[in-house]
Amino acid sequence: MRVLIVVPALNEESGLPPLLSELRAVAERDGFSAEIVVIDDASTDRTAEVAREHGARVVRLCRNLGIGGAVQTGLRLALREGFDCAVQMDVDGQHPPSELRKLVAAMQAPLAPDIVVGSRYLHGEGFQSTLPRRMGSGWLGWVLRLVTGQKTTDPTSGYRAYGRRALKLFNWSYPHDYPEPEALVLAKVAGLRVVEIPVVMKERQGGASSISIVHAPYYMLKVTAAILLAYARSWHRIEPRTL
Amino acid sequence: MQQAEQYWLFAAFCCVVATLLLRLVLRERITIQSSLWVFFSLAALVVLAVVPNLTTRLAHAMGFTLPSNFFFAIATGALALLHVHTLVTLSRTEARSITLTQELGILREKLDQIESARARPAPAGTPALPPPKKADAPHERT
């Protein structure tokens, strides 16, 4: 199975070297062919140079698109170059490369799903985030369940694997602001099979979350509205048989 | 005898705004397509301002007692429509800009790969690739 690991990065020159070295070691140890592409979201530091020095492919965006635009760039590349699967992961240390094999193994299983989401809350192992964040995740999971009928324990997890059908869908349309929960709605409405598997996540090693305690209520409101609107919009636009 | 209601000063103000818009169109600061709605709205306002008692008659026909209320209701509706039109244009432009940025990034990565493959020494017996042609300097618009 050809796997493309998509790492969106903005000013991450210090966080990239340990991640890229560990990713190489894990791919070698677990015996799967993986290419790594760093999507440099218009960084102002040496992110692109550092990524190249560590053997990764680098797509440099000439203006900042945010997490959604950066991830979609990687997924488009994976689709165009015929990869069987793309794995999205963060560079801030929350997503240990050692958990990668679980995602890839789930994609290789018989009756493989189209999207595999790594959930930190499914077995409750590893870093479990703060109480307000868990409450927020719980709320979004409830809204998603209401809309899609599927239980989701970690709707904001950015540790995910996408199969070919998911790559085709997200090449066509991918949400841009805080895209993870909304992407799950698009996938479900398009008839894709989404499964969650337990993964162990770590505490953020560097950088700060884009969602502060002040902005959290606005974020929740915005994402809830985005989920409902994505569901309503998708009725009219997605035809699963075309995927 | 009813006094004819004409608002020449307001009509002149609309003409000044239309002239400013026209200058912007001629200098290609805004496109004809995006400014058409504003021109139509201004033309309608000028007609309302200069045709005697038109505002009063239209206001009464549409159930408004005061022409000023009718005028503000129409102006608010027109501004709301113009705003929606601007939002649609902006959203479409933003979506195109995102796609172009992504395509540019992917193509640049491909180009980097090709250039680094060129820079690597070719194996013995392989014919050398011709040097890349110099591209013309792009025409820059000011």
Image (cartoon, rainbow, N blue to C red):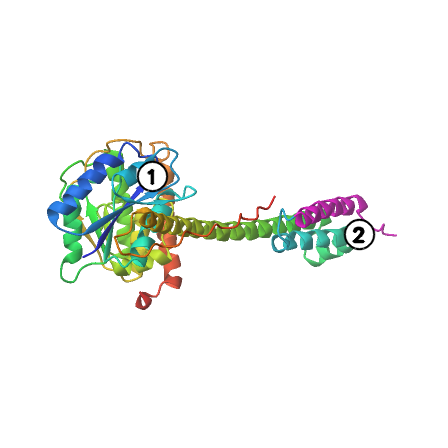
The crowding category of the residue bearing disc 1, from other C-alpha atoms within 10 Å (few below 14, some 14 to 19, many at least 20), is many
The residue that appears at 26% across and 41% down in the rendered structure is A90
Q: Mark 2 falls on what kind of element?
A: helix
Q: Quadrant of residue A23?
A: top left
> Residue B123: where, in percent of width, then height?
25, 52
Q: Which mark is residue B50?
A: 2
Q: Residues under labels 2 and 1: Cα distance? A: 63 Å
| Residue found at the far front of this picture | B125
The disc numbered 1 marks a residue on which chain?
A
Please tell me whether the stretch drawn in magenta is mainly helix, strand or loop: helix
The crowding category of the residue bearing disc 2, from other C-alpha atoms within 10 Å (few below 14, some 14 to 19, many at least 20), is some
Q: Is residue B17 visible?
A: yes
> Residue B23: where, in percent of width, then height?
70, 46
Q: Please tell me which residue lies in front, B94 or A82.
A: A82
Q: Are marks 2 and 1 on the same chain?
A: no
| Residue found at the far bottom of this picture | A241
Q: Amino acid at mark 2?
A: Val
Magenta-highlighted residues: B1-27
Q: Which mark is residue A48?
A: 1
Q: Left or right: where does residue A135 sit relative to residue B118?
A: left
Residue B11 painted magenta: yes
Residue A78 painted magenta: no
